[in-house]
Image (cartoon, rainbow, N blue to C red):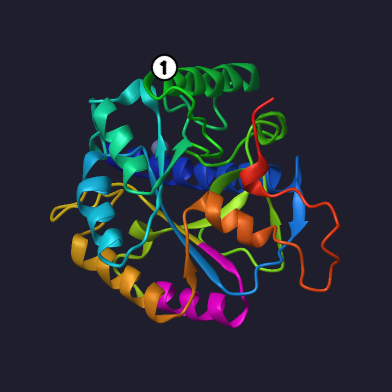
Amino acid sequence: MKSKEGTDNVSLVGVFERLQGKYRRTMAEAFGQRLVPMHNRTPIISFTFDDFPLSALEVGGALLREYGLAGTYYVSLGLLDHEEAVGRICSRLHLNDVLAQGHELGCHTFGHCDAWDTEPHLFEKELIKNQHALQNFLPGTTFKTMSYPISTTPRPTTKRQTGLRFACCRTGGQTNNVGTVDLNYVRSFFLEQSRKDPSVIWNLIDENSANKGWLVFSTHDIATQPTRYGCTPEFFFEVVRRAVDSQSRILPVIGALNEVLAPPLNLPKSTPTRHAADWSLA
Ligand SMILES: [Zn+2]
């Protein structure tokens, strides 16, 4: 009887969590939008790594560099050198390596705070703390883009406040961005969720090419024995290879955003346009 009740409880918890997740995604998507039309002339693909476990640079970054490509590393500077669920997090010196290799460093809050569960004013403090820590480590460097940690779904207030600080903010969503993009909620596809059925990824690359979209891939560690949040080097390499074969432009998030925001060809050159690279923190 006890196990039966336990099973029922687990089932009810599962239903509740799914409903809760759906509610949060709906709220996060609907409010605090910063919608812009996309002007990129070619399909774009970005590779991003959350939490910045060391293997994401040593293995994932090395694979990208084999093709002359760069990615975006979303780091929580309060986790440096920690052993986390995604493996060992990078050290301070790796921050230099990321930039020296042409990658982008992005913000993931200082303490890796859940985008929904953290009170908006505390979440904002975490963003500021991460930015200050970066300036201590690498003077003159600022985060231009960020990704929402853990639930990836910000509360409406958090979404609005965070959007004021960055050129764009990345979520999940398991899809690409086509036609218009919410700069406060740029969709991405977590690779580890399709490790067993990669055809979903190949189809999405094709669809992104056909629709001139912006497809952002996300993951964590890249290891021979990956955590449940990462993938193997072979799997990652195959995604990179297919991305390259798709003739898409492959750019870090801030570079991709510049393409997305580029003025359409028929606009006169005097039309004022704000590019992502112009973004600076207030
Ligand atoms: Zn994270």
Residue 91 visible in rendering: no
Rendered position, 178 above or below 57: below
Q: Nearer the viewer, residue 156 or 237?
A: 237
Q: Residue at x 57, y 32 (%)?
A: 116
Asked which quadrant contains residue 92, the reply is top left
Q: Residue at x 49, y 74 (%)?
A: 248
Dot 1 alpha-carbon crowd within 10 angstroms: few under 14, some 14 to 19, many 20 or more: few
- Quadrant position of the C terminus in the picture: top right
**Residue 240 drawn at (x, y percent):** 33, 68
Magenta stretch: residue 232 in it?
no
**Residue 35 drawn at (x, y percent):** 76, 52
Q: Which quadrant of the figure shows ligand 1?
A: top left
Rendered position, 86 above or below 183: above
Extreme left residue here?
Answer: 224
Q: Residue at x 28, y 64 (%)?
A: 236
**Residue 143 drawn at (x, y percent):** 52, 34
Q: Secondary structure at mark 1?
A: helix
Magenta range: 200-215
Please give left or right for residue 149 compared with residue 3 in the image.
Answer: right
Count of numbered circles on the image? 1
Residue 263 visible in rendering: yes
Q: Nearer the viewer, residue 256 or 266?
A: 266
Residue linked to disc 1: 136
- Quadrant position of the N terminus in the picture: top left
Please give left or right for residue 158 compared with residue 245 in the image.
Answer: right
Identify residue type, mark 1.
Answer: Asn
**Residue 14 drawn at (x, y percent):** 45, 45
